[in-house]
Amino acid sequence: MAKKAMVEREKKRQRLVKKYAAKRAELKAIAADDSRPMEERFKANLKLAQLPRNSSATRLHNRCQLTGRPKAYYRKLKLSRIALRDLASQGQIPGMVKSSW
């Protein structure tokens, strides 16, 4: 089980990303637009830099929904490999059977 503080920190980052997504997209569009004057683009970059760092989507890290484990994460299932194996062994995932040979 992951530390609760790390899971909560990740939730806080997700909230910040959601809150500032529109503003970040708008400022990035202004900064990337070559038809605008250089001063306006520079001001957009400065405003972008003043936003919280954790509001950037690249700061997010995928975590298991059950355990909060950050590594060995399956995107399609939103589970770590360990949680996936436990659920499969219990027969809670349809069509998935533990292999044996």
Image (cartoon, rainbow, N blue to C red):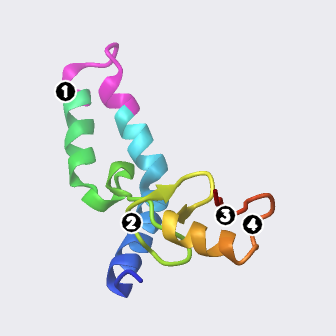
Which numbered mark, 4 or 1, is in the foreground of this view?
4
User: For the view shown, which residue lies furthest in the right direction?
Assistant: 94
In primary-sequence order, the first of circles 1 and 2 is 1
Q: Which residue is mark 1?
A: 39
Q: Residue at x 38, y 58 (%)?
A: 60
Q: Quadrant of residue 36?
A: top left
Q: Which residue is mark 4?
A: 93
Tell me whether circle 2 and circle 4 mark residues in contact (CB < 8 Å).
no
Q: Amino acid at mark 2?
A: Pro
Q: Secondary structure at mark 1?
A: helix
Residue type for callout 3: Lys
Location of residue 39 in the rendering, given as x and y in whole percent from the top left corner: 19, 27
State the separation of the CA atoms marked 3 and 2: 23 Å
Decide which of tag 2 and tag 4 comes sooner along the chain. Answer: 2
Q: Please, is residue 19 above or below residue 68 in the view?
A: above
Question: In the image, what residue occupies the spot 46% across and 51% down?
Answer: 21
**Could you tell me which residue is drawn at 20 percent across and 21 percent down?**
38
Residue 79: which quarter of the image?
bottom right
Residue at 40% over, 77% down: 7
Rendering coords of residue 77 (x, y %) = 62, 58
Instruction: Identify the mark nearer the N-term, 3 or 2.
Output: 2
Residue 33 belongs to the span the image colors magenta: yes
Identify the mark nearer the N-term, 1 or 3.
1
Residue contact at pointers 3 and 2, CB within 8 angstroms: no
Residue 47 falls within the magenta-colored stretch: no
Q: Residue 98's mark?
A: 3
The foreground one among 101 and 79 is 101
Which three-letter amino acid code belongs to the residue tagged 1?
Answer: Glu
Which residues are the magenta region? 29-40
Residue that numbered label 2 is attached to: 70
- Compared across the picture, whether 5 is left or right of 68 comes to left
